[in-house]
Image (cartoon, helix red, strand yellow):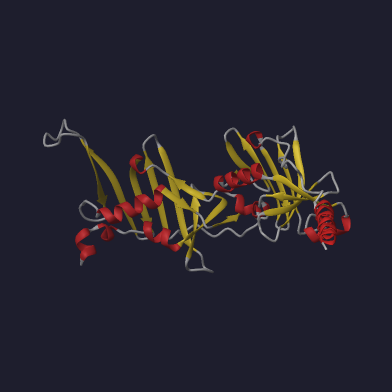
Amino acid sequence: MKRLTIVLIAILIVQVIIWSLTSIDRHVVTEKKNFLASDTSSINFVHIKNEEGEVTLKRIGGLWKVTEPFDYNANPSYINTLLKKLAELKYESHITDNQEKFEDYEVSGDKAAYVEVGVEGGAMDKFYCGKPSKTYTHTYMRPADKDEVWLISGTPKSSFTREPDDWRDKKILVLDKTMMERILLKFPDEMVELKREISSVEFDTTLTAPDTSWVVIPARGKSFKPADKVLNRVKNTLSKMNATDFLVASTDEIPNFEKPALTVDVFLEGDQHEVLDFVINPEDDTKYFARKNGNEETIFVVYKSSFNNLAKRAVDFKEEEKEK
């Protein structure tokens, strides 16, 4: 009986060893190497082709720009996300060399995103980005010069499937509130002027330090001090205004700005001057079109709330009237 038991144990051990040897995935890499040959800190060129079109991004100096299909500053948040995801890509395991299975992993055909990334005029990584793994922690990818599908750790797919317009920097204005000197709010039937005044200790002996205040100069009547809440809303909106979408002259119908609902002139220290014209979107009354400095190559789409924050008439700045 003991002998039989020993024989059975020996057979079990042999079977376990055989199972262990045959179950090893020889395609899994022992050392996870970077998928990109390029050092992401040196990357200055990215070209992406997907179902939505093609876009080329270049780093010029310290600024990333979209250079094709239009010329515009790139969205810095999207650029930072892209570079971070590229740096995290590492080989995980080899999947297949069978070209008939390429479309199953979306590394060929319409669903594949083709990417070129590297140094312009120098080393360039070229690859196809396919679908994510079932766990959404890895991505199927194929080097453009090889018939090899690899499972890569990382999830860059979202960065490679954006529309070209999505790469535009959505900032319309980024202004320092402390540098604002004068603001003109021009309506078709009224103009309101907001002016910063600085009282000097030299001329006002009651002051221990220079004092900054704002006054409202209405089209009719005397000047008065504005309600802080309303004034701050105007200044805050001008200090950081973003677009929700864009119209491009080469592809879209540009609205007529001959009679804007509101024109805002902002004057800052150092002779900086910005002008915004607003007209309502006739197809969506929750949105307005904005033109910056008379340039109609790119028109910004903004929420009505941004317009309302700026469309303040003289009476809106009166504390007493607002309380009533």
Q: Position of residue 57 (x, y in %)?
A: 66, 43
Q: Left or right of 172: which side holds 91?
A: right
Q: Residue furthest front?
A: 1
Q: Quadrant of residue 112?
A: bottom right
Q: Position of residue 36 (x, y in %)?
A: 72, 40
Quadrant where the N terminus sits is: bottom right
**Residue 210 in sight:** yes
Q: Nearer the viewer, residue 196 or 73?
A: 73
Point out residue 74 in the picture as x, y percentages from the top left corner.
Answer: 59, 45
Q: Residue at x 71, y 37 (%)?
A: 118
Total marks in image: 0
Res. 63 image quadrant: top right
The residue positioned farthest toward the left in the image shown: 206
Front one among 110 and 235:
110
In the picture, the quarter occupied by the C terminus is bottom left
Q: Is residue 71 above or below residue 279?
A: above
Residue 213 percent across, percent down from the top left: 24, 44
- Left or right: 208, with 219 as reference point: left
- Looking at the image, the residue that sits furthest to the top is 202
Q: Residue at x 26, y 60 (%)?
A: 315
Q: Residue at x 72, y 40 (%)?
A: 33
Q: Kindly identify the residue that appears in the image at 65 percent across and 47 percent down.
A: 70
Q: Is residue 250 visible?
A: no
Q: Is residue 195 left or right of residue 157?
A: left
Question: Is 62 in front, or is 307?
Answer: 62
